[in-house]
Amino acid sequence: MNLRRVILRGGLLMTATVSAYALSGCQSAQTEKIQTEGQKGESGEPEHSDNQNQDQNDQKGEKGDSPFYAGMAMSETPDLSELLTGSMNLADYQDKWVYYEEYGCYGLEYVVYCENPADPVKECMNIYVPEAYMNSDGTINLEGTVNGYTAETAPIIYKNGIGGYAQADASKMSEKNRSYIDQGYIFVSPASRGKETQAEDGTYIGKSPAGLVDLKAGIRFLKANDEVMAGDADRIISIGTSAGGAMSALLGSTGNVSDYDVYLKEIGAIMDQTDDVYAAQAYCPITDLDHADQAYEWMYENLQTYKNSRSNQEGESSDFEKAVSGLMASEYVDYINALGLKDPETGETLTLGEDGRSGSFYEYMKKQVEDAATKYLTKLSDGSLSATYSLDDYLKGNYTKTGRGKRPGEAGKEEAGTDLSSFLTWDGTTAKISSLDDYLSAYNPRMKTVMAFDNLEMTENSGENLEFGDADHKYMHFDSYMSGVLEKLKESFPSEYAEYADAYSAVNGDQELAERKKLLNPLNYIGNQDAKADTAKYIRIRVGTQDADTSLSISAEVALTLQNQTDADVDYALVWDQPHGDADYDGELIEWIDQICQK
C-alpha cells in the first residue's frame, strides 16, 4: 500500500509518499514446509546421514542460498544502507524518526541493538511510538496521553517474529499491529538470527541459542535507552508464537541468567543492563525440545495415521515407528511422574498411570480441553462470538469453516464443520469430552510423523534438527532418549537399528550440544535456585485445541512448573477451535496487558 509519512530532518517536516507492505510481527506465516529440491544432494536423493557427523562436511551452504522458508516472513529485510548503526544511544538518531500519518505514530527503523553484531541485518529493531508521546523534532512529549498512559508509563510491546526457529526480520507498522499503537503502547519488533543464518563464508551463525541471545540483547538496548525513548522499560512485555512463543517463554523465565553472558558479550550486548521482562505472552510454544518427541507420542500413540497439509505428508506409521511411539510414550509417563507437578487449584500431585490414559495429569489435561470448549460454547450461546451458525448447528457440524492453510495462521479451503457429538456433550453450562483419544481422533488428529521433532532422516523437514546444528553442520540429531529406545528395539528391528543407532548415540556424548539444548529449555531455569533467574511477574500462555504441532502437555508443563515454583502470576488456558498460531479471543490480549499495567 502507499503510506503517507513525514520525515524528520533537523526539526523540519518533509512529507513523502512511500510504498510499504502490510506487514506484521506475527510469525504464524513462517512454516516448516518441506522444499523437496532443498533436501536433495547431488545424486538427487534426499540427504541423510547415518551418524551425527557423517557427510556433514558438505552441509555448510553457500552464502545466499535460499532456505525453504525464505520469503514467508511478514516482514522486510533491510539493505545494509538502511541500518542505523554506530551508536547505542537513541538520542544520536533523534532526527531519524519518521511520522506515519496513517497509523498516528512515529517510527525509528532498523536500529542495530548490539555493538559487535554477527549479522547486523538480523540484529536490528523497529520502534514505533504513538504520536501523542513525541514532538515533531524527535523529542519526547511528556504531556501527551493515550488510554491513560503517558510517554513515561506506556508499556513496551516486544513482539518477536520467530517461527520454526528461523531467522526473523523486524516488522513494519501495519494494520495487524496498529492496535498496540491505538491502545497507547510502544511497539518494538526485533530482528534475530535463526537456524539458517550464515556468515559470508557459509558458516552458520544463527544456531541455538543465537536467536534467544539476540532478543535478550535487544531488551538490554531498550533498557539502556529508557531515558531518551518513550515507554517504560520496566514494563517490557514479550510476545511470540510457535518457536517465537518458546522464545517468549524463555525471556519470561531466564531473565539475567549468567549462562547466556558469554554469548551476549560476543555480540557486544550492553552488559551493564538487564534482560528480564515484566511480562510474557507465549502462543503455542514449541518448547521443552528435550522431551517434545516423547510428549508427542504420548498424545498420539493411539493415532498412527498422519496428515500434514503444510508438507503434503500423509500416511500411516510403519511397524518400527509404532514401536518407537510406544516406547517414547511410556518414557514420557516416567518423565511427567518425576516432575512432581501439582494442580494449582487443588494442590493434588499430577501423575500419569502406566497406560498414559489414566491418572491425575491425564484428568487435568482432559479438563483443560473441556474448559476451552465450555468457554467457546458459552460465548456462542450468548451471542458474543461473530459466528454465522447456531449452537445446535455447530455441535452437529452443520456449517462450513475455513480450513488450515499451508502456513500457520494462513487461511485454507472451505471445509465442512466437525460433528462434535462423537466425543463432546453440552448441558447448557458445561462441556465434557469422552476421552482425549476420542477428541484427538475426531477434532485434532495427528499431523506429524513419529520422531516429529528430531526426525529419523534428519532433513529440512524438522526446524529443530536445523536449530541444533552447529557452525559447520546444517542439522544434527538432538534427542537424548532415542538411542535407548533403539537399543530396546535392536532385535525386533535390526535394519532400522543399524541405520539409526550410531547417529542417535552420538547425541549423548556431545557436551557442546547438551549445553545449547539446556539454554533453549525454560524448564531448566524455572525454580532453579542456582540459576538465579529473574522470572517475569506476569506470564500468559494460550494454545489452540486444534494445535497438532506439538503435544498440548508441553505448554501445561511450563505453566504448571511456573505456578508451582515461582511467584509469577500465570494465566494459562487452551482456546477452543484455534489451530497453531495466535490462539486467542479478540481483545483478550489487550485486556490482559491493560490489567497488568494499570494496577
Image (cartoon, rainbow, N blue to C red):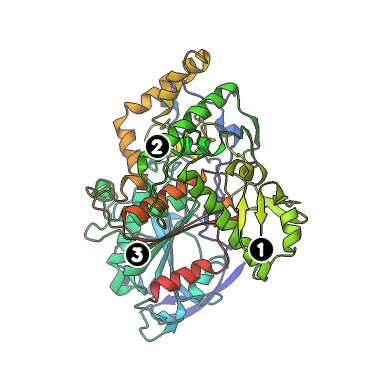
The kind of residue tagged 1 is Gly
Q: In this view, does 116 lie above or below 136?
A: above
Closer to the N terminus: mark 1 or mark 3? 3
Q: In this view, does 96 lie above or below 258?
A: below
Quarter of the figure that contains the C terminus = bottom left
Q: Does the CB distance between marks 2 and 1 fall below 8 Å? A: no
Determine the residue positioned at 42% across, 47% down: 557
Closer to the N terminus: mark 3 or mark 2? 3
Please give the residue where the numbered disc 2 appears in the rendered image: 335
Please give the residue where the numbered disc 3 appears in the rendered image: 278
Horizontal placement of 108 versus 18: left or right? left
The kind of residue tagged 2 is Tyr
Please give the residue where the numbered disc 1 appears in the rendered image: 428
Q: Does the CB distance between marks 3 and 2 fall below 8 Å? A: no
Q: In which quarter of the image is residue 129?
A: bottom left
Rounded to the nearest angstrom, the CA distance separating label 1 from label 3 is: 39 Å
The kind of residue tagged 3 is Tyr
Horizontal placement of 294 versus 215: left or right? right
Rounded to the nearest angstrom, the CA distance separating label 3 from label 2 is: 31 Å
Secondary element type, mark 2:
helix
Residue 25 point in image, percent of width and height: 50, 59
Determine the residue positioned at 62% across, 61% down: 376
In this orientation, which residue lies closer to the viewer: 308 or 131? 308
Mark carried by residue 159: none
Crowding at label 3, few (<14), some or many (≥20) Cα neighbours within 10 Å? many
**Can you see residue 502?**
yes
Q: Is residue 226 above or below residue 21?
A: below
**Viewer-side label of 2, 1:** 1
Quarter of the figure that contains the N terminus = bottom right
Determine the residue positioned at 38% across, 23% down: 505
